[in-house]
Amino acid sequence: MLQALGVSTEAESLYVQIARQEDVALDELPRNGSEDPEALLGELQELGLVIEPSPGRVRALPLAEAAKGIRDRRVAEIDAAVRAAEAMSLHMWESVAPSIGIEVLIGREAASKAMADLCHHSQTEIAAFDRPPYVNTHQPTVAYLEENSPEYQALTRGVSVRAVYHPGFDMERLSELTLFLRHGEQAKLGDVPMKLILIDRKAAVLPAPQSYNPGQEVRVTVVRHPVVVEALVSLFEAVWERSVAIRPTDTGELQQDPRRDALVSLLMSGATDSAIAGQFGVTERSVRRWIAELMDELDVRTRLQLGAALARTQAFRRDNRQLF
């Protein structure tokens, strides 16, 4: 019965006999054939099936509790083996990847340095997909961007910067987006499939999605293989073409939160709150709050009235020409 846990038939028999009593003295351990009871006891102790409550005596733990402990240890061992295999595969890949134009970087410092170097040497254009989650938290100011953002510095040198933003960003990201627009960035709002930065159509930087999970180290892949970069450029252009332009005013400020245009478009198409939440990468509660704010803005009380109000407004008719 216990063989699935790695327990031999002889050790199982010993466990059953010990379990029938509250505890057993070591010198009273029953013998099963030619097997040494102390060796079998060691097997049971190693698996956590028995303990020594006092010197010279042993007690069997409840089988369900012991089995859960064995399971947890096995899972931990398997997880450790998977991590070791991933690390070994990565090191093996690192020895081959540079020769085919692909480089894997581990750690925030190495990733930041590579990104800064690529942007510093950019000459024509930086194109990017931007989407949550984000690992950097900072107050968005011009001074900070001039000191720390290689993309902002590239704009200062006259390099063109285009970016497609996924709607799920927070207000800090919106403030930073505004500063980039003032500085000359071309921006759109769309369904962004991943994080991506393209440099002069010659190199691409792809952060690993798991880098943004708690406790995970930062990993990025730098791609210079021309065929792969060409494919990523085609992907960017396809998403760019079907995305909504984010238009600043003459002063460089946003006309309004760009997510509003996408929200209106989805509402008018009949999308559910769940579908909108999935598109924006937020919770349904956030979507309902945005809709409530829109209803307050247009002074309506029901979704039906909201749809009619949106259809009537000149602002919606103008914005509708820019939607997906």
Image: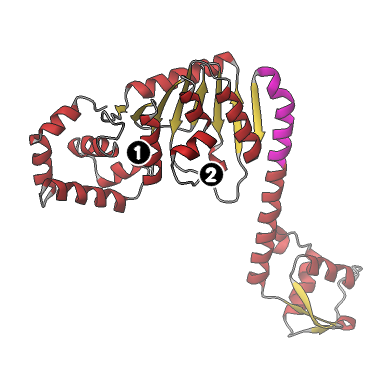
Tell me the residue that label 2 is attached to: 212
The total number of labels drawn is 2
State the residue at coordinates (8%, 40%): 308
- Rendered view: 129 above or below 273: above
Q: Is residue 176 left or right of residue 83?
A: left
Is 2 left, or right, of 131 in this rendering? Answer: right
Q: Please state the extent of the stretch shown in magenta in the rendering.
A: 85-100
Q: Give residue 88's quadrant in the image.
A: top right
Q: How far apart in space, not on screen, are marks 1 and 2 (Cα)?
A: 18 Å
| 203 shown above or below 21 | above
Percent position (x, y) of residue 241?
Answer: 33, 21
Q: Main secondary structure of the magenta part?
A: helix
Q: Quadrant of the C terminus?
A: top left
Q: Which residue is mark 1?
A: 167
Percent position of residue 34, x then y: 92, 68
Q: Amino acid at mark 1?
A: Pro
Q: Quadrant of residue 313?
A: top left
- Provide the secondary structure element on which disc 1 rests: loop
Residue visible at 36% across and 30% down in the picture: 181
Decide: is 117 above or below 89: above
